[in-house]
Amino acid sequence: MSNFRLLYIFYFITFISYGQIAPRQEIRGKLLPATKNLNLETIYVYNKQSKKGVLSDSLGYFNLTMRIGDTIVASAMQIETSELVIKQMHLNDKFITLPIHANMEYLEEVRLSNRSLTGNLDLDLRLLPTEPVVTSSDLGFPETQNDMTKSERLLSSYTSSPIELLMATLTGELKQIKQRIAIENREKKRQYVIKRMPSHFYTKTLKMASINIPHFIDFCESEKELDELIRIPIDEFVEFLQKTAIVYKDNYPDRF
């Protein structure tokens, strides 16, 4: 084997080894939706290798630590799971974009041919099967016009006009908004549960990184529903968190 070939192999092995031990860098990211009306808030973006993740903001931005070869995954009910393998150019730019697509199974198809319309708006609205909408006020959260989410404002706009309500029902947009509101309400519940205790309780008492608190609450939900965690007395809540944190640490030791 020639010296040139040996030298090439040596540099190749060195490069691979460096990629495996190089420290992770915090990189800014942006979710790029394929459709304009896709809700980008609270989409879970995580690193498969480091097992750490964050929630995106309302514009689809997030910050996450990563290095060459890591796989970044975006996951939520309303989107298809999307993945991206980190390359050197991403680290050079200190920015990544992650394309996402709406989950086509998230909405049921609405067939206009199955609807018998009379032409009378009031009668057609009564004949169309609809389910009640659960909003923030139904969950016990104070609600004002300014506090309404984008989805709740859109729903309010639809329900204020019989014509818009009928069209939204027929096209399936009403069902989509209801499902989006359900996701938003679940996130409100989760944030309420998290804020029942100060942040230092999680970081100091439970010895947990603050970035992992939402994931820990999701883990807690496998034992108790969020509604129950909202209602139980604070002493029972604290005891439950402490016991569950032990099991959580056994399952996810790298998150402590």
Image (spheres, grey):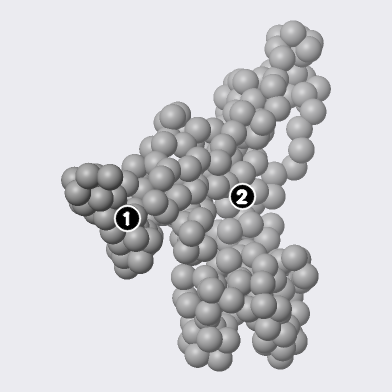
State if disc 1 and disc 2 touch (CB < 8 Å): no
Give residue 185's quadrant in the image.
Answer: bottom right
Q: Position of residue 3 (x, y in %)?
A: 19, 49
Give residue 250's quadrant in the image.
Answer: bottom right
Q: What residue type is labelled 2?
A: Ile
Task: Name which residue lies at 65% across and 41% down.
Answer: 179
Q: Name the residue under label 2.
A: 183
Is any atom of residue 132 visible in this view?
yes
Task: Name which residue lies at 71% across and 66% down.
Answer: 221
Q: In this view, does 224 lie above or below 256?
A: above
Residue placed most toward the observer, 44 or 139 = 44
Task: Name which residue lies at 55% across and 67% down.
Answer: 214
Q: Where is residue 228 in the image (x, y as percent from the top left)?
A: 76, 71
Checking the image for residue 13, the label placed there is 1
Q: In this view, does 94 lie above or below 165?
A: below
Q: What residue type is labelled 1?
A: Ile
CA–CA distance between discs 2 and 1?
47 Å
Q: What element carries label 1?
A: helix
Residue placed most toward the observer, 48 or 116 = 48
Is any atom of residue 198 visible in this view?
no
Q: Is residue 94 above or below residue 140?
A: above
Residue extending furthest front? 1
Residue placed most toward the observer, 133 or 212 = 212
